[in-house]
Amino acid sequence: MPGRLSPTADRVVAARAARADGGGAWLRDLPHRVDDLVHPWRLRLGEPLAGGTAAVVHAVTRDDGTPAVLKLPVPDPGNALSTRTLLAADGDGLVRVLAHDGDDLLLERLGPSLTTTGRTPQAQLAVLAQLLPRVWRLPPDGATVDKAAELTTFLLDLVGAGPVDYVTAMALQFAARRSRAFAPERSRTLHGDAAAANVLLAPARPAGAAFVDPDGLVGDAAYDVGVALRDWSAELLADARPAGLLRGWCAEAAARTGTDPQAVWEWAFLERVSTGTYARTLGAEDLADALLESARRLLPEI
């Protein structure tokens, strides 16, 4: 008989669910929903997997002994597009779907996150640069998205009606530039959250890794590269000239992916500020502080 534990959402996932339409009911129904999946899929439920911010994720074992992952996302209108993107990729550059029921997914179990390997940012960027074109060549699913315009609205909603600080003002200036440069005819299928934390090791795959958790939106390819460069705040904060360090990463990543380094730079800064501001609303203070302080440290040389 398949076994189960009592699934719970950690603080960050619960905070995200509290903001979502239907999130309260989703939290209350988690144990029942797991039962609804474990038995028909004949799974033995293992330990929860940490690190996600928008889903409850558990290690599971199938009845044939194959390890897998059960993912129950927080309710979100974008979940359906994410699933369609995974199915379209069929394991090429992205984790493979073994079964799905609505938004809930049974996924192949891959290795640890790229962020746990001790590789330098440059080495991690090299892996990301190999994976991103595999996502970008997927057929577009749905309308193109002016992501900069979306992030402008998102960031303004987060900071409220009062005056914005200089860091936020610079992020909004970059958003305006990216929105003006938006060219729907050059848009591609994007991962949408192409951070190293969303890359898991998969030695048998090209690049030795695969993405998880795609958004599947259609937009500017440089946005995906900018998201990747949103990370490594600790390295930037430890450097005497963080802007020069980040400029070098942007140039290298842009060269590897055929994107524009200035666009990558602007997306990276916008993502650093918007993500840091959002993390603060979720109570993830350490993440928020690192992102926003590193953004502030970049300003003198922008």
Image: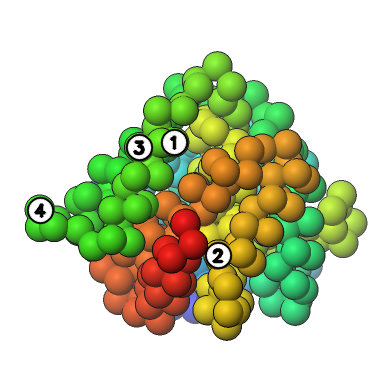
Q: What is the spatial separation of the Cα atoms under label 3 and label 1, in whole angstroms?
A: 6 Å
- Which type of secondary structure does the marked residue at label 4 adopt? loop
- Which type of secondary structure does the marked residue at label 2 adopt? helix
Q: Is residue 268 above or below residue 203?
A: above
Q: Quadrant of residue 62?
A: bottom right
Q: Amino acid at mark 2?
A: Ala
> In the drawing, what numbered circle is on residue 176?
3
Q: Is residue 152 above or below residue 196?
A: above
Q: Amino acid at mark 4?
A: Ala
Sequence-wise, which precedes: disc 4 or disc 2? Answer: 4
> In the drawing, what numbered circle is on residue 243?
2
Is residue 281 or residue 167 the one in the foreground? 167
Please name the residue that numbered disc 1 is placed on. Answer: 178
- Which type of secondary structure does the marked residue at label 1 adopt? helix
Q: Amino acid at mark 3?
A: Ala
Mark 4, Cα crowd under 10 Å, few <14 / some 14-19 / many 20+, is: few
Please name the residue that numbered disc 4 is placed on. Answer: 161
